[in-house]
Image (cartoon, rainbow, N blue to C red):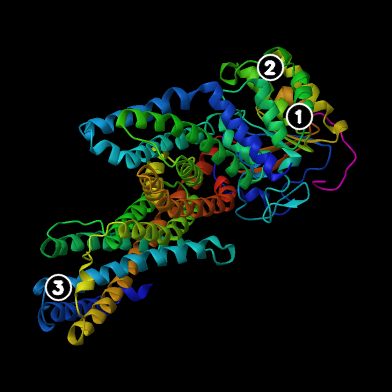
């Protein structure tokens, strides 16, 4: 099987598990929702400050939800020693990485669409620069999913994995946080041209993250 | 490594640091604008330098461990030791930067590019150290920590770039970096260079000491493992297998 | 157990093609470790080991597609059905969906095909693991306590599979507590104790033509 097909097989497996268990839909998405509401409480639902803070708050909510999604992606590999199954399968490590990261990215992107709608409605945001928004979101999501998958496998099998992965991931994806929120802010203010440089940063980060993951996932998955 | 046990090594470090203090606190002149507060420069710059040096050493040691031909447990221990010393210095950098900020900017913290990048570096370090503590076997720890260190190291320039970009959006006019406002010349220049060198020496001392400790811990673990195996074999024999 | 396994230095253990080798030993003796080592899952700390012609010190991943390990766990996903799990594992090994379904039938799992893995009984799980192993068409079959949890019918299926192995071109390494049952199919018996391998005369008394080591 080609690299691409192997990756699709793994991505398909993860997405099928999600479709069956509905963890992202029933748990992670509502979690994102309550975070969006929580921010409104934190900022005292100010008519003026919420729309201004919206880009950053949106991405903060997405990041928190992403941590859950990453954790979930690797929790399914723990039961029944499924990880050994992956090792024995003969699948290429890089292909497994791409597959798992892709599944996370798809879930995250759908999550962003819903949370985005919630933020627009709840924070009173006026939308402009949709193309930039979508491009930025795609690039950011890939970078986030890829980095999360790398740290997810890095911490796999370790005790305290659940608390360790968030600590490892968040500082590392700072560029995505900055890029995503600044790109969104520029787009929503109507100056899309200011947003494109940030999109470039996001794309560069994503490329690096995917490259690093493709190389490191196989060795990290192995024992010893 | 045993050089560190020679008393004169530690004594030299103390002397060098004392000289640094003398220059920093008395001999070098106060700044025209900032006055005596500028003396924090002699602490801030060296600690920032060590913070990055520490991480660099961790990254290099990680590479040496990952490459099968050069792999030795010592590299993994060195990476950990350097990271521990590095994180302490990073913390000091942030605190000193904050203390310096109060009289010069009026606040304890500003989100300028360098300070913010240092803060992120601090968290990257903390994550790495947390990872070191949770890995089970030495091999596992070596592999995962080495890759984590390299990813973090590669990430630092990207973080710095994005943070710097971010700051240029805030066209507030004044440059928040205390260093930039200071004219460095003559005695001040000499003191600064000496301080950086002295702290580097201090860093080396601390890392070697920590490495020594780590090697002792490692030896202890090996011994405990051997005892456990011997015990089990004795049990098997008694069970008549 | 640990990765320290002195018994695999040099010629301490040699298995030839078409053999069905029984690994006997108490719990914790090292049977599972040996099997996992053969599967390339554990790194070789010292000594030399070759599996299916591949030196484990050089590359312990290369031969994985040609072998299959059936351990205590099924390596499956709780939320997927029996058929989905078998199909995934089979396709991951580069084989087809048809192979997966054939193995599923051979192990008598036809009626359980759409049952979610989390709801399977112990016996059914054993069969799923075995089905996955067979669907991969391995040249080396590593079985770790395969009889545990199997009912009468399951055991007869397992025995049929193991007996058929040599004629299908497979070599079997079988670790088991249940010596009476296992001895009926094994061609050779090896004892493992405290991480060391001891040879013992085979109970069955059958011999097969000797081929090259680890062919």
- For label 3, the residue is B38
How far is the residue under mark 2 from the one under mark 1?
16 Å
Q: Residues within 10 Å of mark 1 (few under 14, many from 20)?
A: many
Q: Nearer the viewer, mark 2 or mark 1?
A: 2
Report the residue marked by disc 2. C113
Position in image of residue A216 (x %, y %): 56, 52
Horizontal relation, residue C179 to residue A179: left or right: right
Q: Is residue B1 magenta?
A: no
Res A125 seen here = yes
Residue at coordinates 40% horizontally, 48% vertically from top-left? Answer: A183
Q: Is residue A87 left or right of residue B108?
A: right
Residue name at image x 46 percent, y 39 percent:
A130
- Mark 3, Cα crowd under 10 Å, few <14 / some 14-19 / many 20+, is many
- Magenta segment range? C204-215
**Numbered badge on residue C196:** none
Q: Main secondary structure of the magenta part?
A: loop
Say which element carries label 2: loop
């Amino acid at each position: 099987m080609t690299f691409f097909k192997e990756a699709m097989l793994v991505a398909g497996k993860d997405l099928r598990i999600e479709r069956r268990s509905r963890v992202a839909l029933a748990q992670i998405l509502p979690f994102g929702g309550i975070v969006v509401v929580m921010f409104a409480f934190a900022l005292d639902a100010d008519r003026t400050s919420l729309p201004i803070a919206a880009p950053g708050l949106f991405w903060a909510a997405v990041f928190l939800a992403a941590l859950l999604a990453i954790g979930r992606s690797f929790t399914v590999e723990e039961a029944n020693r499924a990880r050994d199954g992956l090792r024995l399968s003969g699948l290429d490590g890089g292909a497994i990485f791409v597959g798992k990261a892709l599944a996370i990215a798809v879930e995250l992107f759908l999550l962003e669409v819903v949370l985005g709608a919630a933020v627009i409605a709840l924070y009173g945001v006026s939308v402009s620069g949709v193309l930039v928004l979508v491009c930025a979101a795609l690039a950011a999501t890939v970078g986030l999913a890829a980095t999360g998958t790398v740290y997810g496998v890095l911490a796999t099998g370790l005790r305290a994995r659940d608390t360790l992965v968030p600590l490892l991931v968040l500082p590392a994806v700072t560029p995505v946080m900055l890029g995503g929120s600044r790109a969104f802010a520029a787009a929503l203010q109507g100056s899309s041209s200011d947003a494109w440089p940030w999109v470039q940063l996001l794309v560069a980060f994503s490329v690096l993250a995917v490259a690093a993951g493709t190389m490191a996932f196989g060795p990290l998955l192995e024992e010893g | 490594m045993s050089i560190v046990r020679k008393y004169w090594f530690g004594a030299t470090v103390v002397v060098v640091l004392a000289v640094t203090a003398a220059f920093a606190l008395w001999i070098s002149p106060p700044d025209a604008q900032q006055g005596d507060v500028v003396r924090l420069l002699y602490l801030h710059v060296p600690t920032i330098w060590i913070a990055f040096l520490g991480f660099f050493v961790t990254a290099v040691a990680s590479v040496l461990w990952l490459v099968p031909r050069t792999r030795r447990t010592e590299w993994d221990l060195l990476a950990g030791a350097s990271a521990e010393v590095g994180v302490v210095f990073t913390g000091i950098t942030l605190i000193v930067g904050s203390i310096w900020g109060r009289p010069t900017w009026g606040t304890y913290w500003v989100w300028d590019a360098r300070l913010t990048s240092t803060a992120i570096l601090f968290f990257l370090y903390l994550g790495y150290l947390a990872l070191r503590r949770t890995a089970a076997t030495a091999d596992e720890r070596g592999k995962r920590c080495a890759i984590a260190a390299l990813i973090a190291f590669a990430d630092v320039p990207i973080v710095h770039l994005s943070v710097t970009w971010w700051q240029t959006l805030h066209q507030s006019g004044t440059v928040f970096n205390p260093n930039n406002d200071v004219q460095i010349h003559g005695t001040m220049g000499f003191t600064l260079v000496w301080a950086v060198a002295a702290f580097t020496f201090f860093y080396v001392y601390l890392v070697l000491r920590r490495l020594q400790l780590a090697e002792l811990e490692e030896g202890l673990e090996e011994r405990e493992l051997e005892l456990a195996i011997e015990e089990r074999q004795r049990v098997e024999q008694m069970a008549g297998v | 157990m640990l990765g320290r396994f002195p018994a695999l230095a040099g010629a301490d253990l040699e298995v030839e093609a078409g053999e069905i080798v029984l690994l006997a030993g108490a719990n914790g003796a090292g049977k599972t470790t040996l099997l996992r080592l053969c599967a390339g899952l554990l790194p070789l700390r010292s000594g030399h080991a070759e599996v299916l012609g591949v030196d484990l010190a050089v590359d312990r991943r290369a031969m994985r597609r040609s072998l299959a390990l059936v351990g205590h766990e099924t390596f499956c996903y709780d939320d997927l059905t029996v058929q989905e799990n078998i199909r995934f594992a089979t396709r991951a090994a580069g084989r087809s969906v048809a192979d997966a379904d054939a193995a599923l039938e051979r192990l008598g799992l036809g009626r359980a095909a759409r049952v979610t893995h989390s709801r399977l009984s112990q016996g059914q799980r054993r069969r799923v693991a075995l089905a996955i192993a067979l669907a991969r068409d391995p040249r080396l079959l590593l079985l770790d306590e395969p009889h545990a949890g199997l009912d009468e019918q399951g055991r007869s299926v397992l025995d049929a599979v193991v007996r058929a192995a040599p004629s299908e071109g497979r070599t079997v390494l079988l670790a088991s507590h249940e010596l009476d049952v296992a001895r009926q199919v094994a061609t050779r018996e090896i004892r493992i104790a405290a991480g060391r391998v001891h040879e013992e005369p085979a109970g069955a008394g059958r011999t097969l033509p000797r081929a090259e080591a680890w062919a």
